[in-house]
Structures are given as structure tokens and as C-alpha cells.
Amino acid sequence: MSSPFEEFSRAVLCSFDQTIDPRLRSTATSSLEGLKNSADGWTFCLQALSVTAEHRVKFWCLQALVNMVQLQQRYITLTEQQQTTMRGALVAWVQSKGALQTDEPAFVKNKFAQLVVGVMKIDYPQRWPELFPQLLAALQNGPVAIDVFLRVLNTINDEVVSAEGGGFDSQVASRIKDGMREQCLPQITDAWHSILQLHESAPALAAAGLHTIHLYVSWIDISLIANGRFMEAFLKFLHQPQLHEGACLCLSEVVSKRMDAVAKLEHLTRLSIVSRLADAASSSVQLSSAFAALSSAVSLELLDCWDRLTVRGAPSVESSAMAEQASSLLRQSMPLLLTCFGATDIEVSQCTMGFLHSYVGRLRKLLPSPKDVAEHSEHLQHLLVAMTRKAVHPDGYCFEDEDEAEEAFISYRREISTLFKGVARVHASLAQAFVQNTLDSTLANLENAPWTFIEVALWLLFQLGEGLPDGVIREKGGVFQQMMSTLLKSSASAHPHHAVQLLYFEIVVRYYRFFLAQPDLLGGALQCFLDRRGLYNHHQAVRSRVCYLLLRFIKQTLKSATRDFLEMVTQLTEVLLLQRDDSSLLGLDGRGLNGLASAASHEALVNSFHQSCDGCTCRASTCTRGSRGGNEDGGTGDSAVNGDSLHSAQLTLAEQLNLYEVCGLLLGAGLAPSEQVGEKLEALLSKPLQQLQALCTCGLSLPPPSASSDSAADQQLFAARAAAAAHCISVVAVVSKGFCNLAGEQQHGGGGLPRAAFSHAMKLALSALHPFGKFSEVRARAIMLLHRVVETLPDGLVDFLNPALPQLLASADSKEVQEVVTLVNQLVLKFKAKLAPTITQLVGPLTSAIFSLVASLDSAIANSSSSALPTTGPQSDEVRERRGLMRSYYSFLHSLVHNELIAVLADPLNAPHVGTSLRALLQGCVEGPDLQLQRQCFVVLQRLVESWGGSDSNFDAYVLSDILPVCFQALAQPHFKLSDAASLPLVEAVVNLQKVMLNQLGARTTCYLRDTHLPSLGCSAEFCADYSRLLEEGDVRQLRDFLRQQLALVGEGHTDR
């Protein structure tokens, strides 16, 4: 017959076994849970712990006891005798451990340590003062007892001392730390030293001891550790690989011990830590991350001492002497620090970054004293050299397929960049001289220097600009201009490696002011963009970046442009005309769908077009991990592209748009007569307009996307055509950015060619809305183009708006409708009453579109979990979208009533929408949480009452019965708070509206208020009379203040009026 312990062991093992019958495992788990929760289950677990040999059973027993002590908190309910029994059993278990044959798995020892600390948190030191003497006495039993002892100490740190622990209790931590200080810390440190003496026979135990020691240094008496016996051991262990990291951790904690500046400086001086670490480094100690962190900690502490003694402390002879001592020690620590920074391993180098950033930041405080800065020049010079070396790309770096190591290098290089710019701000002349020497020596040996060296020299020049003041960069004949002249005279722009080429262009664009000061060099710089070095570069990444950078460069230097720049338009037009024509892919060559289908599948054609949108079709993946850096171009040559052919300049659609915009800027800069500009403009737009014309014609031959189609492929082809049309519209829009108002061109003798070209282009572009208006990308580009029409052809605006806006609104989503409203508001502000006929036609469709979308959103909101519109807290996407639509509609009405266009709302064509508009305004007056938006609605109502009130009896009645009540409803909403800064303007808007009602409707307003409305709100007769009299006799400010006073009293519950 099995004993209870055997049955218990089988149940535990069964509960851990995932391969057995789930029902059996469930039965075992239930029985174990019953045991765990039983009153005497803990005694059974203690007995089982001592008799079982199965490790998983021991772990289960310990876990059950931990739960009883910590989670169930049943330990504190035990009798004193029972608690003593448990503590005795724990000590007995430790005492049973000694030689290696008594060892347990780490998970069992860790769980035991957790149980000991759980009991300790309750009983130590008052009811369990003998805990540490008992643990210390067991150490002589052997290595297993030592291991358990260290694990208990580690757990004390994790679960008691460390504030990062989830159950941290400051009172418990203070009680236990105070108890250990009073009773046992000297004995514990003696035990630690004894454990460290086992470093030859038991190096793993010594390493564990070092780890434990470093956890305790921060809160124990520093003299217990910062003494001869421990320091000698730590320094000796720096040379032993297994103990190296632990020794570094201990020394870092010793030097970082919190003290005031004077005590810390004396502490570091007494330790001679700077010289000792330098000696260790000179004796070939491992340059590890831990050693670099230690070196950085020493330097950081010395920097803090220097800072506190000089800046924060009261000046005195003694403090000045100590500050100088700290500064001297800091300078002595720099060589070792820079050695760690220059380590080959990036992780080692990064450990020094925290100190270096602090060091450079501290030196900025010395800027008023060049002499003090000069004392650090040598270290800054060495730091610049080290940063340059660390910024060099590693061998075999692959740009096209970066792995984790390469991403880590890029991140590390960004940090170096920040540090370098900091040094340049601290010592500008030193940084300039260093970069100039590096650049000159590199460019002088350009043919033989590795591309990585050339790239880092240019990188330094690129970064230098952010670290220097503008005055230094603009200094005529200064070092910076000398460096730029040297670069431009070199052949760096023609270097075969694309990383060097890209950085060259980045430098040209960043320092465009140099070319403004030296306009004779501008033409040569631009030529780099236009030849094999730029647009015709065989590397796709360079071509792509050059298109963007050229646009930036032209924008920045346009004011220095001359007539010769127009030749660039001709060259760029040639490039753009040579781009691959997708007409055949889109079925525009006259063969029709059947002919097209025989050539290729529709899906392939669609994918081909979108590939041209996303990336160059000639791009080839050329980086292989097995053959990095195999050629002069870093192993990334593009064999699919012939650099000598014009056709190599195949560009993505986004890159083409950049070039079109460049041409537009140059053509619109007034560099040539209007006739010449018009001819070049027509040539530039000829290809996209021809394609757009063909797309619009062919697009109508397919059924719309919402209708049934012969195949899904037809719909895909239609979508591809829409994407092509959107690109063509974008071309017209970006080219127009270079032109301002062309309305008076003919009157100034210009001949009107640019105006005529744009007028034709814009009409054709907007006509694409008819076949492709159901596609969002086409609508978005059309809205962008209409914004440009406002700036370019304002006098012909109506000709573009009338056919375009109805097409836009027919399929627009809420975001696009809001964009249309923004466009219309822009027009209204610009043209005011002149736009009345057009706006009259637009009010109806715009109102219908907005409220159709609002109705759909209201339905979605009603079907959601909460049908109410929350005024505070999280909002659903539908609620946010609805509020955005209503906000745009209120802004539309606000623009109309403030720009001489109120009459369009009352036009017979728009009469059916008046009621809808008024109801929306009334809702906006009371709906929160935006008080400013509510005020806007009141202002619109005020203007309507000013215009329509007193002339229409029906409207007058509506004012009293519907508009007047919202003046009081708005102020009674839960979200309205007088403490809100926006409440005062809202109250004032409410008062202004009532004043306008009084002016337009006369005594009917006060009579209605006094006799009907205010009494319906429960107001006393006295209040009704006072309010009506104040409305008639007081000014706006008096009535506003009266209302605020009454609202404040209501909020405090002090009024019954």
C-alpha cells in the first residue's frame, strides 16, 4: 500500500505531465489544490520537502508554501509555535546542504530563497534575529550552502530592497536594512571576502559572490567594501575572464556610491581608481562592455564633482582647489575613456556615450572662458579622431539589404553625429580645422583612398553645418567656404560609389547659402544633378534622391537664377519625355480590351503600372551577403542599367513629379519672355496631357466599378487607368506651383501663352473626374489642383469649379468633403460677393453631401454599443468623423455670413436647405465639448438674425420659439464650465445674439422672455423682470457679467432664482 507521500508525489508529477489523460491531470490538480488550501497543508509540504527526492515535487511544495506566506497571507495567522516550526524547517533545509551531492536544481534553490525572504519580510529582525547567524554558520558545510546563501541575499535585493520590484514596501525595506546594519553586515562582508578567496577552486561561486556584492554596495557602509582587501581582489579579478564582469560591476558601484561632492572626490582620490584602471588597461585587461561602463562611471563621477564644486557650490579658496583637483583627475581619466570609446566592438563603445554627451554638455558652460575650454582641447582633438574612425562604414557593408548589425551601426552613427555636433558647438575652430585637414588629405588622395574614408570625410563636412552658427558658415573667405571650394574643385561628385555620390549632393543642398554668396559656382553645381552623376546615374538610389534634392536646391537658390537656367527645363523635359509610356499597358493603343488581353493579363498590367508608382522598373537587387564589397561600387553595381544611355534615367512617378515641379519653378520665375515660357510649358505638359486625354476617352468604354462587369480584370484595369489619370493631374498641379496670378498676363503684354497653356491643362485635368471620379486618388488630386487654380487662374475660377465640384461631391467621403469645404472657404475669403452665382449653385449639393454622410454616421453610431455622442472621454471613429463634418459645415456657413454671401442661403434654389441649416446650427450651439465651436454657431445665428429678422414674420416666430431657447440651453449643458477659458467668449456670444434679437424684433423679445420662456425654466417673476430690464437697458458686458454671476450661484447651489 502506497504511503501518502508517494501518492502525493504521483499527483504532483501527473499535474506537470502534459502527455497524460487530461481528466486524470485535472483530478490530480484538484486534489493538490485542496491540499494547498487545507489548514495543515503547509505542514505536509514541509515534511514532503525533506523526504522526497523528486525535484519537481520539491518545487511544488516550495511554491505552495510561498503562496501560503505571501499570497494567502496565512503565515501571520499561525500560532507562534507553528511559525517557529516553519522557520526551523527552513534553517534545517539549508543546514542539510553542503557538499555537491546535496545540490539542487537552480529553480528549487531560487524558490527556496523566495520562501525564506517571504517569511523574513514578516518576522525579521524582531521574531527571527537568528536568521543570518544561522545562514552564516551553514557556509562551512560546503559550496551548496554558499550558493543558497547568495541566492537568499539576491532575493532580498530583488523583493525587498529594490524599488523596481512589484511588491516594494518602503517601510519593510527600511526595517530589514536597518536590522541587517545593526546585526550582521560586517559578518556578511567577511563571508563575501571568504567566498572570493575560492576564485581558483570554485570560480563560479566567486563570480556569484561578486554579483551579490554589487547589489549591496549602494546601501551598506562603503568602508565595508572600499578597503584594501576588497579593492585588491576586484582589481585582480579584472584580468580573469570568468570574474571580469562581476569585478567591473562591483567597482562601478563603489565609485558611484552617493555622496556630496567633497566626500566623493576624497573617496575617489583615496581609491586611486583613475591610475589603477589605467594600469589595468595597460596590462592588457579585456576591453569589455563592463570595463567601458566602469571607466565611464569613474569619469562621470569626476565630472559631477567638478560641476558641483564649480557651478553649484559657493566659491571659496578650498572649493576652487578641489574643483581644480576634480578637473585634473577628469583629464587624467580621459585617455582610458577614449580608448574604450574607440574599441572595435560597438557595444563597448556605446557604454561610454552617456559620459561623453555629459562631458561635452558640461564644456559648453565654459564657452565664456576660451582659456578654460583650451585646457580640454587635446582631449577634444582625440575625441574627434576617435569619432571619425568609429563613423567609418565597416567592411562589407550592404546598403540594399541591411541586417541587424548594419542597422545597429546606423543607429550608433547617429549618436556619434549628435556628439560631433556638440563638440563643434563647444570648440568651433578646432572642429573646423579638424574637418578641413581630414577633407583636404582625403581629397588629395581621392583615387587611392577607400570609399569609406572619402564618405566619412564628406560626412564630417555635412554634419559640421548643424554644429556651427550661421555666421561661421557665411563668413566670406572663412574656413567653411574654403572647404566647400575644395570639394567643388575635386572629382568627388564622380566617385563610383553611390554612398559618396549621395553625400556630395546632400552637402550641396545643405549649404546652398554658399552658392548664393558665390553665384558663379551655381551652374557647375547644377550640372552635377543633370548628368551621369545625377539623373543619369546607374544607381537607382542616387537617381531617386537627386530628383528630390534638385527640387530643394532650386527652391533655395531660385532668387539667384538667370536666364541660362531655362536650359535646364529643356534638359529635364527631355528626361521626362523619355520615361516609359504606359499607354499600351493601359489599353490606349487602339487594340481594345480583347487585343490587350491577348498581349498580357489585366492583372499583370495593373501590377506593372503600380510598380512604376512604387519603384523604378530597372532596379535590380544586387547585394548578396556572400559577396559584399566585391567591386568599386561596394558590390552594388546595377548591371540592368546602361549608364551611358539616356534611357537609364527611368524614374518613379514620385521622382517625375519632383522634376516637373522644378520645371514649373524655373518657368514661373520670370527668367524669359512669356512666349518662350509658354512654348516650354506646352512642351513640358504635352505628354501627360496626351495620356490624360486618351485615358478620359478610353475610360468611358468600361463599366463603372459599381456595375456588373465581364470580369474582375476589367475593374483592375479601370483602377490602373484611374491611378495614371491621378498622376497626370498631379503633374499639372505641381507645375502650377511655380506660377502666381496669371489673370493680368495679357494686360502686361505677355501674350497669354502660359495662361492659355494652364487653362487648357487644368480643364483637361479636371475633366478626368467624369470617368474616374469614383476613385479617391483622382478626387484628392483634383482638390489639390483646384487649390492651385485659386492662386494661378483666379479670374477663370468659375469655369473650373462649375463642372468639377459636383463630380467631386458625388462620390466624396467625409474627409474629402471637408477638403472641399476648405477649398470653398478659401474661395469665399478671396472673392466674397463676386462668387455669389457660383456659391448659389454649390450650397445645395454641398449641404446634401454633408448631411447624407452625417445620416450614415448617425446610423452607425446608433447601432454601436453607445448611441449617445460623448462630450468627454474616448470617442469612436464614427463620432470623430461626424464632428469633423459638422465642424467643416459650420465653418462654411461662418464664411458665407461674414463675406457678403448671406443672400445665397435665401436664394430660391437653396430654400429647401434653410431648415436643415438652422437645425444644424441650433444643435451646434448646445453640443459639446468644443465651446469655441458653439460660439461660432451663435455668431452665425447672430448674422442671420441681423439679416433676416424683422422682415419675415415666420422667421421672427422661429427666432423666439427655437433660437432664443438655445441661448439658455447651451449654458445649462454638463460640459459647460465657467472655469473653462472658452466659457467667457461663449457667454458673450449668447448675449450678443439676444441683443440682436432685441434690435430686430423689438419688445416682442423681452415680452416673450419675461412672460413665456424664462417662467418655463422655473425662474421667479423677480428674476424674469430683472433679466428683461437688463437686456433692454444694459450693455453687452453688463448682461454677460450678470449671466456669469447667476451661473456661478447656480453652480454653488446658492440661488433659487
Image (cartoon, helix red, strand yellow):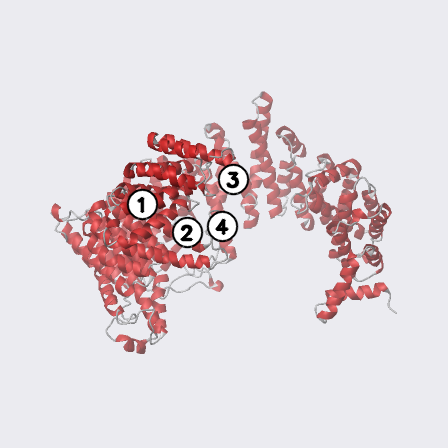
Q: Quadrant of residue 330?
A: top right
Tell me which numbered mark, 4 or 1, is placed earlier along the sequence.
4
Frontmost of labels 2 and 4 is 4
Q: The residue tagged with tag 1: helix, strand or loop?
A: helix
Please report the residue visible at 60 percent of the width from the left and 43 percent of the height from the top: 293
Tell me which numbered mark, 1 or 2, is placed earlier along the sequence.
2
**What label does residue 357 carry, if any?**
3
Q: CA distance from mark 4 to mark 1?
A: 39 Å
Frontmost of labels 2 and 3 is 3
For the residues bearing labels 3 and 1, Cβ distance under 8 angstroms:
no
Asked if residue 598 can be seen in this view, the reply is: yes
Frontmost of labels 4 and 3 is 4
Q: Which residue is mark 1?
A: 957
Please report the residue visible at 44 percent of the width from the left and 52 percent of the height from the top: 452
Please report the residue visible at 42 percent of the width from the left and 39 percent of the height from the top: 1015
> x, y (%) of residue 81?
87, 47
Nearest to the observer: residue 5 or residue 650: 5
Tell me which numbered mark, 4 or 3, is placed earlier along the sequence.
3
> x, y (%) of residue 465?
39, 41
Q: Quadrant of residue 184?
A: top right
For the residues bearing labels 4 and 1, Cβ distance under 8 angstroms:
no
Q: Amino acid at mark 3?
A: His
Q: CA distance from mark 3 to mark 1?
A: 73 Å
Indicate whether 414 appears above or below 11: above
Q: Quadrant of the N terminus?
A: bottom right
Q: Which residue is mark 2?
A: 449
**What label does residue 591 carry, if any?**
none
Q: CA distance from mark 2 to mark 3?
A: 31 Å
Q: Amino acid at mark 1?
A: Ala
Tell me which numbered mark, 3 or 1, is placed earlier along the sequence.
3
